[in-house]
């Protein structure tokens, strides 16, 4: 009886927590974005850009946005560290893929990293937000241009969007978070992860 009621309570009242992976090649601006998110959505002051160093392990950030709890996992993007990414795929509700829009000579590297993500079965159905970052720089290309360059056919089958942002000044970030939360809330993948976590409604006692 207790487990029946507890299951029901958990199903109806526990606040959803979404896990969002922040991926992208080194120097794209992932950690700068994470720190900006903390400053914008929590009462923690995120680290200023000049105190951020290349990521080797994992940075975690928790915020509340759109009445939802979000946990971000920011991983290192250096070539030798990208093999670690897949260890986090199974538990992720969505992916934010960050690209330095002011650095076109590295677009090819971003494209192949993103292709691998799209092919991985552990991330099936995860909404994908692709950010053309560093829009505060005059050399940055638009989100549309980044999309045209990447030209990924695999994207057609998945919920995704390209948005222009600046992790420095916050441009576009609120729209990006709003899109992610909306997509995760209605995604089949969220339903799947909920089932796996046991938040399935009442279970027979
Ligand atoms: N102008 C500008 N510079 C940025 C922006 N975001 C990040 N940067 C700079 O880009 C460089 C790399 O930023 P990081 O946040 O460390 O990049 P990362 O993707 O976390 O890199 P790894 O941890 O090595 O994977 C730093 O010098 C940042 O200050 C931005 O929106 N605008
Ligand atoms: Mg980093």
Image: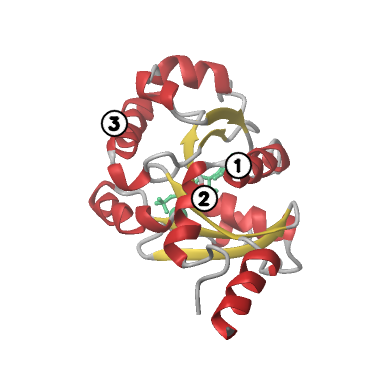
Q: Position of residue 53 (x, y in %)?
A: 46, 60
Q: Which residue is mark 2?
A: 190
Of the 4 image quadrants, the one containing the N terminus is: bottom right
- Helix, strand, or loop for circle 3? helix
Q: Gap between marks 3 and 1, in whole Å?
A: 28 Å
Q: Position of residue 58 (x, y in %)?
A: 41, 64
**Label whose residue precedes the other's in the sequence (3 or 1):** 3
Q: Quadrant of ligand 2?
A: bottom left
Q: Position of residue 138 (x, y in %)?
A: 62, 25
- Helix, strand, or loop for circle 2? helix
Tell me: is circle 2 under 8 Å from ligand 1. no
- Helix, strand, or loop for circle 1? helix
Instruction: Look at the picture and state if 178 lies above or below 158.
Output: below
Of residue 162 and residue 179, the one placed in the foreground of this image is 179
Tell me: is circle 3 under 8 Å from ligand 1. no
Binning the other alpha carbons within 10 Å of mark 1 as few (below 14), some (14 to 19) or many (20 upward) gives few
Q: Which label is found at residue 106?
A: none
- In the picture, measured across the screen, residue 2 lies left or right of residue 59, that is right
Q: Gap between marks 2 and 3, in whole Å?
A: 26 Å
Query: Which residue is most to the bottom?
Result: 2
Of residue 116 and residue 184, the one placed in the foreground of this image is 184
The residue drawn where x is 59% and y is 85% is: 2
Binning the other alpha carbons within 10 Å of mark 2 as few (below 14), some (14 to 19) or many (20 upward) gives many
The residue drawn where x is 60% and y is 39% is: 183
Q: Position of residue 95 (x, y in %)?
A: 47, 44
Q: Gap between marks 2 and 1, in whole Å?
A: 7 Å
Q: Which residue is mark 3?
A: 112
The residue drawn where x is 37% and y is 65% is: 57
Q: Which residue is mark 1?
A: 186
Identify the coloring: secondary structure
Of residue 110 and residue 179, the one placed in the foreground of this image is 179
Are discs 2 and 1 less than 8 Å apart at CB? Answer: yes
């Amino acid at each position: 009886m207790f487990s029946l009621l507890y299951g029901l309570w958990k199903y109806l009242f526990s606040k959803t927590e979404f896990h969002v992976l922040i991926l992208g090649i080194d120097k794209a601006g992932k950690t700068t974005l994470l720190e900006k998110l903390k400053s914008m959505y929590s009462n923690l002051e995120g680290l200023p850009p000049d105190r951020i160093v290349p990521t080797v392990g994992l940075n975690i950030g928790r915020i509340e946005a759109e009445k939802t709890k979000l946990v971000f996992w920011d991983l290192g993007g250096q070539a030798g560290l990208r093999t670690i990414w897949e260890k986090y795929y199974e538990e992720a509700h969505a992916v934010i893929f960050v690209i330095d829009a002011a650095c076109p000579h590295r677009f090819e590297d971003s494209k192949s990293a993103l292709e691998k993500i799209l092919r991985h079965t552990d991330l099936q159905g995860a909404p994908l937000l692709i950010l053309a970052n560093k829009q505060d720089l005059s050399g940055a290309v638009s989100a549309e241009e980044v999309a045209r360059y990447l030209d990924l056919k695999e994207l057609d089958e998945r919920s995704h969007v390209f948005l222009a942002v600046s992790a420095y000044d916050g441009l576009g970030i609120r729209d990006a978070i709003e899109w992610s939360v909306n997509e995760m809330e209605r995604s089949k993948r969220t339903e799947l992860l909920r089932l796996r976590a046991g938040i399935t409604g009442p279970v027979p006692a």
